Amino acid sequence: MSFPPIRPELAGIEPYGAPQLPVDEVPVQLNVNENPYGPSDACIHDIAAAAADAARTLNRYPDREFVALRTALASYLSGEVLGEIVAEQVWAANGSNEVMLQLLQAFGGPGRTAVSFAPTYSMYPEYARDTNTHWVVGKRADDFSLDLEHALRVVAEHSPDVILLPSPNNPTGTALPLESITALCEAVAGAPGSPTGIVVVDEAYGEFRRTGVPSALDLLPTHRNLVVTRTMSKAFAAAGLRLGYLAADPAICDAIRVVRLPYHLSAVTQATALAALQHAPELLGNVDQLRAQRDKTVAWLRDQGLEVADSDANFCLFGTFGDRHAVWQGLVDRGVLIRETGPDGWLRVSIGTPEEMAAFEDALVEVMKEMS
């Protein structure tokens, strides 16, 4: 018997994670879809003050229900919808990764099935594995849009308890039409008022969507089995904060309470997130600039004769290359780190500052010339 006595299905598996290389060796880091613009001095000051206040009570457990934070998140989301989202509809955890894991803990598990459609976020099958949920993956269309007819066939065949739908999709950046979300919510609904499966629309990159592209938040009043997840890691420029959240029917939030660990959100996390939300207009102020830079990057890549997926996120998937790893390595050798992910032959670049994108473009031109 080998040591340690890990579960057999986990033996030999490498931990998930994008390559992390020292900034002094690879100064242009465009591989994990971070916001390149940090918080202002005023925001930093308020976060520091909030953390200091929280530190005064660290001998006590934090608010287990984090009511103030849920109220603030609900207020923020209400600015995107015609109606109102209330605190009882909101749940939060340490990054949207923990939100997703909690959803699979509550609604997946042994004897239950989760479905998504590839290419999609590579952590989804890991959430399923970690919760002993049966994993089924369908496929997307050639342009990476969701093939609704195929998706409905997969749902009819497997009767999933959870459907995971990133919109915009990672790694392709493709957004979903509301009609597709509605069709899938209806496909896993049971008797009226008693859905038998939930549909999770992962909007981690939702704030970057192009003008006119709707959010699934608009469908919450219509579908009790719909969950919309968000994060403060991307548009809010708070990847180091680790705060993800969801909006859903209050009954779904109540169900998650059963599986969440006690006091899972620290007092410092709650205080920091609340302080950051007070600076939402400022933190989101660079979103328009990043969207413009994304569209410019898409156009530039296409001008180089490359294929590029339409993107509503803060990254672009581009290709195709006979040896994408050689391209990736060539960029690293020139001080630029992007992500080797997605279908064979494709690469993904996060959108950085204009200076970072210029460095990426110069490096890619050199690599492509070298390989031609």
Image (spheres, rainbow, N blue to C red):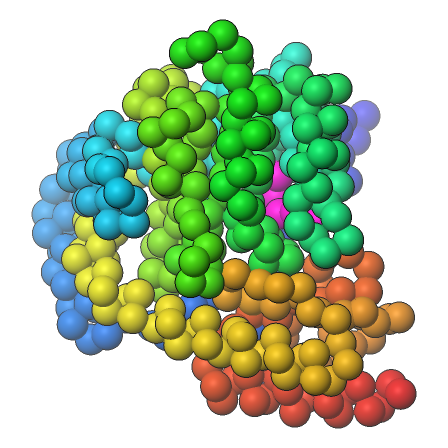
The C terminus lies in quadrant: bottom right
| Residue 145 as seen in the image, left or right of residue 294 | right
- What x and y, as percent, mark residue 184? 58, 29
Q: How many marks?
A: 0
- Nearer to us in this view, 17 or 4: 17
| Residue 228 as seen in the image, left or right of residue 127 | left
Q: Would you say residue 204 sits in the magenta stretch?
A: no
Q: Quadrant of residue 310?
A: bottom right
- Nearer to us in this view, 232 or 201: 201
- What x and y, as percent, mark residue 115? 65, 30
Point out the stretch of residues depicted in magenta.
Answer: 119-124
Tell me the residue at 50%/66% (across/down): 314
- Say if residue 344 shows up in the picture: yes
Tell me the residue at 37%/69% (across/down): 287
- What x and y, as percent, mark residue 42? 16, 72
- Nearer to us in this view, 253 or 132: 253
- What x and y, as percent, mark residue 127? 59, 34
- Say if residue 261 shows up in the picture: no
The N terminus lies in quadrant: top right
Tell me the residue at 42%/62% (across/down): 211
| Residue 344 as seen in the image, left or right of residue 241 | right
Q: Quadrant of residue 9?
A: top right
Q: Main secondary structure of the magenta part?
A: loop
Image height of 5 relative to 218, above or below = above
- Nearer to us in this view, 26 or 65: 65
